[in-house]
Image (cartoon, rainbow, N blue to C red):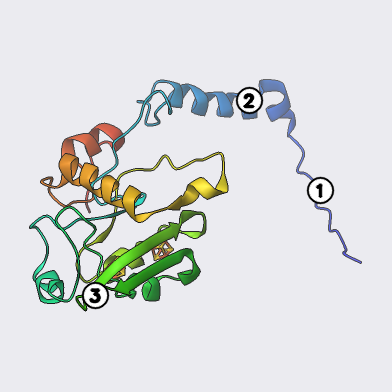
Amino acid sequence: MVKVKYVERPGLSNRERIFFLDFIKGMKITIKNFFRKTITTSYPFEKLTPPKRFRGTHAHRVKNGNEPPSFKVIEKFMDIKDGESRCVACYMCQQACPVPELFKIEAVQTPEGKKRVTRFDMNLLNCMYCGLCTEACPVDCLIMTDIYETAAYHRASCVTHMEDMTQRAIDFDRRRYNEPDRIWIDDEQRSKLWGQIKWS
Ligand code: SF4
Ligand code: SF4
């Protein structure tokens, strides 16, 4: 049986009882914060744009001429047309993921002897948005975007497919590809939200 230990609540002194000292102390903090600048936003009416490096919903970059040199090496073994996902089905993302079961990746060999990715599904209900999969991708295909509104009415809607992911990456890159790759959008926005940081 679990033993419960009771600790006696400290009583108020006569001075505290007469002058409502605790009440005044509490009100002092309330009034001080009442006049401070608000740092919260009234979501969903007000939405912040997360920084570019935010770990939001996953996307697949397409073959568009901006591929890293590693892709050029593998490209000749792949059947990937312009505008299609640049995934080479290497499974590195799945290997790096702490929950590998959430990936369903399939590829086939074409009659020309090339490899073609036929399926790339991710069950984002099991994802913890750690970003390890994106770090592992050797061709800069799998990325995370600034999309954070992922609530759905059905579990099935939380499985994202390759077609959705390529569209998401096209949209993300159109909006943010040329933005500097930094954690905050800019110092002005950061100081507006949280004030000036005093580095020691
Ligand atoms: S973000 Fe993390 S948990 Fe989610 S798929 Fe990538 S590696 Fe797995
Ligand atoms: S690591 Fe990149 S290229 Fe390899 S399977 Fe995953 S998304 Fe495709």
User: Which is more foreground, mark 2 or mark 3?
Assistant: 3
Provide the secondary structure element on which disc 1 rests.
Answer: loop
Looking at the rendering, which quadrant does residue 44 occupy?
A: top left
Check disc 3 and give the amino acid type.
Answer: Pro
Question: In the rendering, at what x and y percent does residue 133 appear?
Answer: 34, 67
Q: Amino acid at mark 2?
A: Phe
Q: How many marks do you count on the picture?
A: 3
Q: Residue at x 23, y 47 (%)?
A: 52
Q: Is residue 53 visible?
A: yes
| Relative to 185, residue 73 above or below | below
Q: Which residue is mark 3?
A: 111
User: How many other residues sit within 10 Å of disc 1, few (<14), some (14-19) or many (≥20)?
Assistant: few
CA gap, disc 2 and disc 3: 80 Å
For marks 3 and 1, the one nearer the N-term is 1
Report the residue that reaches farthest toward the front: 111
Image quarter hosting the C terminus? bottom left
Which sits earlier in the primary sequence, circle 1 or circle 2? Answer: 1
Tags 3 and 1 in contact by the CB under 8 Å rule? no
x and y percentages locating residue 97 in the rendered image: 41, 70
In the image, residue 32 sits, relative to residue 115, either above or below, namely: above
Q: Which residue is mark 2?
A: 23
Q: Nearer the viewer, residue 198 or 140?
A: 140
**Residue 23 percent across, percent down from the top left:** 63, 25
Question: What residue type is disc 1 on?
Answer: Glu
Give the crowd class for mark 2: few <14, some 14-19, many >=20 residues within 10 Å. Answer: few
Ligand 1, image quadrant it occupies: bottom left
Q: Residue at x 53, y 49 (%)?
A: 156
Q: Which mark is residue 8?
A: 1
Residue pushed farthest right? 1
